[in-house]
Image (cartoon, rainbow, N blue to C red):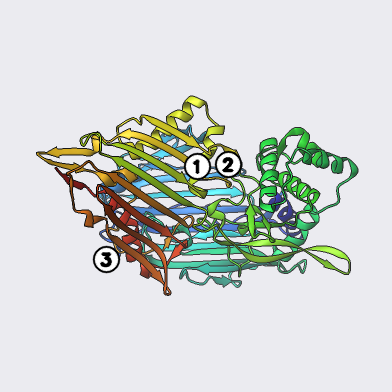
């Protein structure tokens, strides 16, 4: 990985200046033989489960093999419901690359004081076949309401110095939370707390050799992680830290973006030798030329993604010739290839390092390499981004979780005739509603049979919506694809099989260029109920099932959606003579979310009737990604308006 290679050099500098080895301070840590009592605050007594205490210690030390990091977790969880019993009947053991498990202990303290200590015979294995992963866990038996689960883990791992996030809030209330970072005294760490977390306290007096950074919190409220359209991980209390100085070597401002940007530029914007120059030129001969820059970039992206298999964990190749010959590329390799090809076409680009906004939002005020985990390419002349690694994306579409977020843009600047890489913090935009715009045109024809109308549905999915469907055709068999189209159609036809189903603009070749089309024809008898001379037609179901947003408790998190999007729906109802339609006024709907005087979300519906033809139209739109908490109720009304429309039944009388 690009970042790890660069940070590894700095880590070596850090290690080389460390002195005497020592044992980590919690080597002999264990739980108390007699479990300590801890009173549950009144505010938490009705909760399903409560974390009575949560201790986390991280200690960085040095031995003859270099720097190591030791991590301690000690949790005590109070079981207060049947749901908590079911949720906690497995205690998963820590796992990961380059992780050595030194201690893993667990026990159950029953409410009568009896202690059940879990041992090796209680360790079971679980296999996640979908992800091809194996997990080990303690099988917890004998749980009851009023019991306490206690676990202690100690791990040995490689130190994380270039940026780390530690979260101190959960969807479960925490009575006491303690975090400690212990490190050699000649090192200086930089920290930042978020969402109301207490500032850390630094202790340099207790130990002659180490500094201890501590955060203590009490009675941390649970923050629900099940609120739809939210970004939970960015709103909980957390701490970010990184190594900033080495007082022995005099190194300051370690892991800064300026040095990182310079190193990245020097690595990727290099002059190719003759062999690589010819290889790139030959590779580019098969890329169609287009005077429209976005179209040209689409052609380049399509060629590379169809020619080279990407895996960020592949071994790096020596040359670009090796990359093209092997048809395999790591993260750094794929970036080198893109830059070389873009230079061949004289296209100005910038490398952008980004983070997942739903995991670790990019903080422009705290320079941490943890924010530099993903890569994009930016083209300033058209203000568009390209993701070089994700095979199913094509410009202008990029992973939505990387957009609506800040990033580090690596720009080329010339000083005294020498080009250098400059890092600037900028914002990664995402295409607006004009790209992800879905349309639905439905014709319901009752003229031949009032009890079995013929329904014709023409669906268009643009932008990110189309991306949900278009790639599948190129990765599965024809029969599987037909089955998938049928399953998509069932959202609109119900149990009825469509009499015709046709797709258009599917496959990778249309992503980012054309919207995905699906045309259906089916009989609507399942949507009709007859009561004497009255026919009840579930017209709302023709637009497919719709998301409903319910909020059982008071909403705590603001709304954050994946991307702006909009829908236009038009329903034409053709009736025979002498049919009277009631309750058409139900189609008149008007719900809007206004922020700072602008309508940023809405559902607006109306109808008109011309003799035996009724036309219903509605527009639903979400122009922005973030909706403040104070606007949640109006946003919820917009979301639920489509669900309410879905429930409308038309009353027809002869």
Image height of 329 relative to 172, above or below: above
Please tell me whether mark 2 sits on a helix, a strand or a loop.
helix
Per the rendering, the mark at residue 516 is 1
The label on residue 42 is: 3
The one of 163 and 562 positioned closer to us in this rendering: 562
Tell me where residue 89 sits by quadrant.
top left
Q: Nearer the viewer, residue 155 or 358?
A: 358
Q: In the rendered image of this protein, does residue 184 appear above or below residue 505?
A: below
Identity of the residue drawn at 37% across and 40% down = 457
Q: Is residue 533 left or right of residue 592?
A: left
Which dot marks residue 288? none
Q: Provide residue 384's location: percent of width, then percent of height.
A: 63, 57
Q: Earlier in the sequence, mark 2 or mark 3?
A: 3
Quarter of the image that includes the C terminus: top left
Camera-nearest residue between 9 and 501: 501
Disc 2 to disc 1: CB gap under 8 Å: yes
User: Which residue is drawn at the image coordinates 80% and 41% (left, top)?
Assistant: 320
Q: Secondary structure at mark 3?
A: helix
Disc 2 versus disc 3: distance between alpha carbons?
Answer: 59 Å
Q: Earlier in the sequence, mark 2 or mark 1?
A: 2
Where is residue 110? Give x, y as percent. 29, 48
Label 1, label 3: how far apart the Cα atoms are = 55 Å
Report the Cα–Cα distance between label 2 and label 1. 8 Å
| Residue at 41% across, 56% down | 229
Horizontal and vertical percent position of residue 540:
28, 47
Q: Is residue 576 visible?
A: yes
Q: Residue 372 at x, y = what percent? A: 64, 57
| Residue that carries the numbered disc 2 in the rendered image | 510
């Amino acid at each position: 990985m690009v970042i790890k290679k660069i940070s590894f050099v700095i880590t070596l500098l850090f290690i080389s200046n460390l002195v005497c080895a020592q044992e980590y301070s919690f080597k002999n840590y264990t739980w108390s033989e007699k479990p300590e009592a801890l009173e549950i605050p009144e505010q938490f007594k009705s909760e399903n489960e409560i974390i009575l205490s949560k201790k986390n210690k991280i200690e960085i030390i040095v031995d003859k093999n270099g720097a190591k990091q030791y991590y301690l977790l000690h949790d005590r969880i109070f079981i207060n419901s049947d749901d908590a019993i079911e949720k906690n009947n497995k205690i998963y053991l820590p796992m990961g690359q380059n992780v050595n498990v030194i201690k893993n202990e667990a026990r159950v303290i029953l409410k009568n004081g009896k202690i059940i200590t879990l041992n090796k015979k209680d360790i079971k294995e679980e296999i996640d076949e979908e992800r091809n992963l194996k997990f080990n866990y303690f099988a917890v038996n004998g749980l009851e309401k009023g019991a306490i689960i206690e676990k202690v883990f100690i791990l040995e791992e490689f130190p994380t110095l270039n940026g780390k996030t530690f979260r101190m809030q959960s969807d479960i209330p925490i009575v006491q939370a303690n975090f400690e970072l212990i490190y050699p005294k000649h090192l200086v760490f930089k920290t930042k707390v978020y969402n109301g977390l207490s500032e850390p306290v630094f202790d340099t007096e207790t130990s002659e050799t180490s500094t201890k950074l501590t955060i203590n919190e009490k009675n941390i409220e649970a923050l629900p992680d099940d609120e739809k359209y939210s970004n939970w991980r960015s709103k909980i209390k957390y701490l970010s830290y990184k190594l900033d100085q080495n007082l022995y070597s005099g190194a300051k401002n370690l892991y800064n973006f300026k040095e990182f940007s310079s190193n990245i530029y020097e690595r990727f914007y290099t002059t190719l030798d003759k062999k690589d120059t010819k290889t790139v030129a030959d590779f580019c001969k098969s890329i169609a030329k287009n005077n429209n820059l976005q179209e040209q970039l689409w052609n380049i992206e399509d060629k590379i993604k169809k020619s080279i298999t990407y895996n960020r964990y592949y071994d790096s190749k020596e040359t670009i010739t090796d990359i093209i010959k092997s048809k395999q590329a790591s993260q750094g390799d794929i970036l080198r290839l893109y830059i070389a090809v873009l230079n061949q076409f004289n296209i100005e680009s910038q490398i952008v390092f980004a983070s997942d906004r739903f995991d670790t939002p990019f903080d422009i005020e705290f320079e941490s390499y943890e924010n530099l985990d993903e890569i994009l390419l930016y083209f300033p002349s058209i203000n568009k981004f390209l993701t070089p690694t994700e095979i199913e994306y094509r410009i202008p579409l990029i992973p939505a979780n990387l957009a609506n977020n800040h990033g580090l843009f690596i720009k080329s600047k010339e000083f005294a005739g020498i080009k250098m890489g400059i890092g600037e913090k900028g914002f990664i935009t995402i295409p607006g509603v004009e790209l992800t715009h879905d349309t639905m045109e439905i014709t319901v024809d009752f003229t031949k049979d009032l009890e079995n109308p013929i329904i014709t549905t023409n669906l268009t999915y643009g932008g990110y919506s189309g991306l949900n469907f278009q790639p599948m055709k190129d990765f599965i068999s024809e029969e599987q694809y037909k089955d998938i189209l049928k399953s998509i159609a069932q959202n609109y036809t119900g149990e009825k099989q469509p009499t015709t189903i046709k797709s258009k603009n599917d496959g990778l070749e249309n992503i980012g260029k054309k919207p995905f089309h699906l045309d259906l024809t089916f009989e609507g008898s399942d949507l009709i109920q007859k009561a004497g001379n009255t026919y009840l037609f579930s017209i709302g179901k023709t637009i497919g099932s719709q998301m409903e947003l319910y909020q059982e408790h008071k909403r705590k998190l603001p709304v954050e959606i994946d991307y702006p999007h909009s829908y236009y729906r038009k329903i034409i109802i053709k009736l025979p003579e002498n049919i009277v339609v009631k309750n058409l006024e139900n189609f008149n709907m008007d719900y809007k979310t206004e922020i700072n005087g602008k309508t940023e979300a809405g559902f607006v519906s109306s109808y008109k009737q011309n003799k035996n033809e009724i036309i219903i139209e509605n527009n639903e739109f979400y122009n922005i990604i973030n909706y403040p908490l104070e606007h949640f109720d109006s946003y919820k009304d917009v979301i639920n308006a489509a669900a309410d429309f879905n429930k409308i039944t038309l009353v027809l009388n002869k």
